[in-house]
Amino acid sequence: MITIKSEEEIKLMRQAGYLVSLTHQYLKPYIKPGITTKELDRLAEEFIIEHDGVPTCKGYEGFPATLCISVNDEVVHGIPGKRKLKDGDIVTIDMVIGYHGYQGDAAWTYAVGSISPEKKYLMEHTERALYEGIKEVKPGNRIGDISHAVESYANRYHLGVVKELIGHGIGTKMHEDPDVPNYGKKGTGPKLKPGMVICIEPMLNLGDSAVGILDDDWTIVTEDGSPSAHYEHTVLVTDDGYEILTPRI
Ligand code: MF3
Ligand code: CO
C-alpha cells in the first residue's frame, strides 16, 4: 500500500530528512585518508543521538552499525570496521535516520583525497542519473518514468545499472511501497500523487552491472571488481513537482 502523507507528517519527514543532510555535512570533513570506517560510524551515531534522532539501520535485520559504508568495488551495505580509507578511494555513506517516528534516507559517494578521472566520471554521472530520475517526479507521472530516466542516462554514459537493489517508498518505516527500480519503461507502474514520499537511489558501476555478496552476508560488491557509486535522495511528490527532503547543505 502506498501511503499519502498529511501536512503534519510531511513536516516531520522534512525534519528527518534535514537531520540526514546535517549528518552528511558533519561527516564530510572527516572523510580523509587514515580514518577507519568504524570511526566514521561512531561519529555519525553520536551526532544523530545528540540531535534527537534514531540510527534506524542499527539492528535492522541484524545490521550491526549506524552507517552503511561501501568502498570502491563495494556497491552498498558495507559494514563499518577497522579498514582505513586511503588516498584515491571512493566511499559511499548511506544512512537512514528516524526522527519523531519518521524516516529520512540518503546516500552520497565521496572522494578520499585525489581520485582517478575514471572514478570522477563514475561519481559525476551517477549523481546526474539521480537528478534525471528526480526530474520525472510530478503528479500524473509514473514510477516507470523515473526508472526509465535513470536507466537511459546510465546507458548513455556506459555505466552498469545494478538491478538487484532498488529504491523504495518511505515513511514511518524505511522501506514502504512502491518499489522504485533503476530500470524500466516509461508510462508503467504506480502513478505519483501529491504526498507520496519515495527514495530514488541509482547504484551504477564503472564496469558490468553484475554484483555478488561477501561472506559477511551484507556487503554487495561488483562481480568484475570495478568501482561503484550510489546517490540517494528522499523525495516528496508536491502539487506541481517535487521537494528533495534530504538537500545537500
Ligand atoms: N539505506 C538503505 C536503503 O536505501 C538501507 C540500509 S540497509 C540496512 O534501503 F540494513 F543497513 F538498514
Ligand atoms: Co534507501
Image (spheres, grey):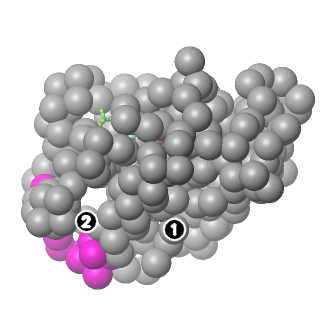
Q: Distance between the residues labelled 2 and 1?
A: 26 Å
For disc 1, does the CB lie below 8 Å from ligand 2? no
Residue in the picture at 48% in, 27% down? 176
Residue in the picture at 16% in, 32% down? 59
For disc 2, does the CB lie below 8 Å from ligand 1? no
Residue 85: mark: 2
Q: Looking at this rendering, what residue extends furthest in the right direction?
A: 187
**Residue with the mark numbered 1:** 247
Q: For numbered disc 2, what is the local secondary structure?
A: loop
Q: On the rendered image, what quadrant is the N terminus found in?
A: top right
Q: Nearer the viewer, residue 227 or 125?
A: 125
Q: What stretch is highlighted in magenta?
A: 26-39
Q: Which of 236 and 81 is in front in this view?
A: 236
Regarding residue 220, the answer to whether it shows in the image is no
Q: Position of residue 149 (x, y in %)?
A: 80, 45
Asked if 154 appears above or below 218 in the picture, the reply is: below
**Crowd class of label 2 (few under 14; some 14 to 19; many from 20; radius 10 Å):** some
What amino acid type should be assigned to the residue bearing mark 2?
Leu
